[in-house]
Amino acid sequence: GAGVSQSPRYKVAKRGQDVALRCDPISGHVSLFWYQQALGQGPEFLTYFQNEAQLDKSGLPSDRFFAERPEGSVSTLKIQRTQQEDSAVYLCASSLGSFNQPQHFGDGTRLSIL
Amino acid sequence: QKEVEQNSGPLSVPEGAIASLNCTYSDRGSQSFFWYRQYSGKSPELIMFIYSNGDKEDGRFTAQLNKASQYVSLLIRDSQPSDSATYLCAVNNNNDMRFGAGTRLTVKP
């Protein structure tokens, strides 16, 4: 079956531009997670949805970061007024939904801010 | 102190040997534990998960959990060059997942 799909795979933007990253989770997966991964580091939690409800956004680094999942399926992570320190790989993961279930990752979006 | 600690490596083992990867965590409320493999430039791939103390085996992989010591490990038997990757330990408490920085494993032919 289809896995977690993320687009675009690569994104280059100039500092100050807004970007939007898309995640299409595994069909039927209730929970969706966004992570940021810097080079040589493990993924860092950004935010978590259960269906359309954003239950935890404590990992978002600033108010320039915004995520939504309006219909409980596809999610978008938006970064406004991008800064160079936003350059990273953004990973999306989904899980069946009950707590502590394994999370399955997409291929990520590599964001480079010039 | 980081919440999830792993030796960054690199850990180098010869082909056919046992590779032992270790992880300690600080949150005593953690309920589920995962090992992910990540090839360079690729996304993390789930290879093992464990919820209870003791050992869990799946093919060449064995996960070991000791909640009292806050310690989880991964053993890879009969290591192959294709096992060369970074292995991420992840610790979950009610969907609050924390990752270690990963251990880089190299299996030499």
Image (spheres, coloured by chain):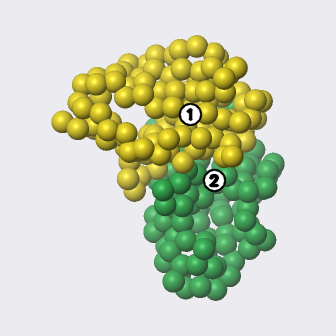
Chain colours: A green, B yellow
**Residue B108 placed where, x, y %?**
23, 38
**Residue A44 placed where, x, y %?**
63, 53
Between B31 and A81, the one nearer to me in the picture: B31
Alpha carbon distance from label 2 to label 1: 17 Å
Against B70, is A71 above or below?
below
Amino acid under disc 2 = Glu
Against B46, is A21 above or below?
below
Find the residue positioned furthest to the left: B109
- Residue at 63% in and 79% down: A83
Tag 1, which secondary structure? Answer: strand
- Residue at 58% in and 51% down: A43
List the residue tagged with mark 1.
Answer: B23
Against B20, is A113 above or below?
below
In the rendered image, which quarter contains the C terminus of chain B? top left
Tag 2, which secondary structure? Answer: strand
Between B60 and A25, the one nearer to me in the picture: B60
Between A69 and A49, the one nearer to me in the picture: A49
- Residue at 24% in and 32% down: B14
Amino acid under disc 1 = Cys
Residue A29 shows in the view: no
Compared across the picture, whether A113 is left or right of B27 comes to left
List the residue tagged with mark 2.
Answer: A44
Q: How many marks?
A: 2
**Residue A80 placed where, x, y %?**
69, 77
Residue B70 shows in the view: yes
Against A78, is B94 above or below?
above
- Residue at 81% in and 48% down: A55
